[in-house]
């Protein structure tokens, strides 16, 4: 229902306030996003903040705002 009303959505992924990527999804359903993080965007020994924003959240009939469900996140040092 939500995707039929919003259409394709774009997520902006940021780490420590630096834009990591923008990704567009043209269909509903589970997705996998993987992306290398530039070393200069991370500081060894310090906590990092990951944020994801959506360009078109879905607003239900009762005015609740919904975005997406993040099931799992992980960072891997390479």
Image: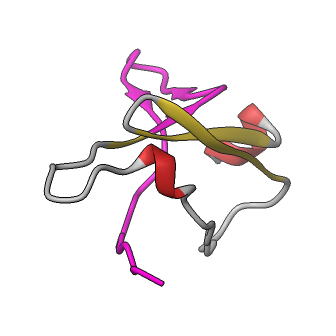
Image spot of residue 58 (x, y percent):
56, 30
**64, above or below 41, in the image:** above
| Residue at x-position 80% and y-position 60% | 27
User: What is the chief secondary structure element of the magenta stretch?
Assistant: loop
Q: How many marks?
A: 0
| Residue at x-position 48% and y-position 26% | 60
Relative to 2, is 77 on the left or the right? left
Image spot of residue 13 (x, y percent):
55, 43
Image spot of residue 41 (x, y percent):
46, 45
Give the extent of the magenta segment: 52-78
| Residue at x-position 24% and y-position 58% | 44
Relative to 61, is 25 on the left or the right? right
Relative to 69, is 36 on the left or the right? right
Visual colour scheme: secondary structure
Query: 14 or 56: which is nearer to us?
Result: 14
Q: Quadrant of residue 5?
A: top right
Query: 33 or 8: which is nearer to us?
Result: 33
Magenta region includes residue 61:
yes
| Residue at x-position 28% and y-position 43% | 49
**75, above or below 41, in the image:** below
């Amino acid at each position: 229902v939500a995707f039929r009303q919003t259409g394709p959505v774009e997520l902006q992924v940021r780490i420590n306030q630096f834009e990591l990527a923008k990704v567009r999804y043209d269909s509903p359903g589970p997705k996998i996003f993987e992306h290398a993080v530039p070393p200069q965007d991370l500081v060894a020994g310090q906590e990092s903040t990951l944020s994801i924003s959506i360009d078109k959240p879905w607003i239900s009939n009762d005015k609740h705002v919904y975005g997406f469900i993040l099931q799992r996140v992980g960072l891997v040092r390479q």
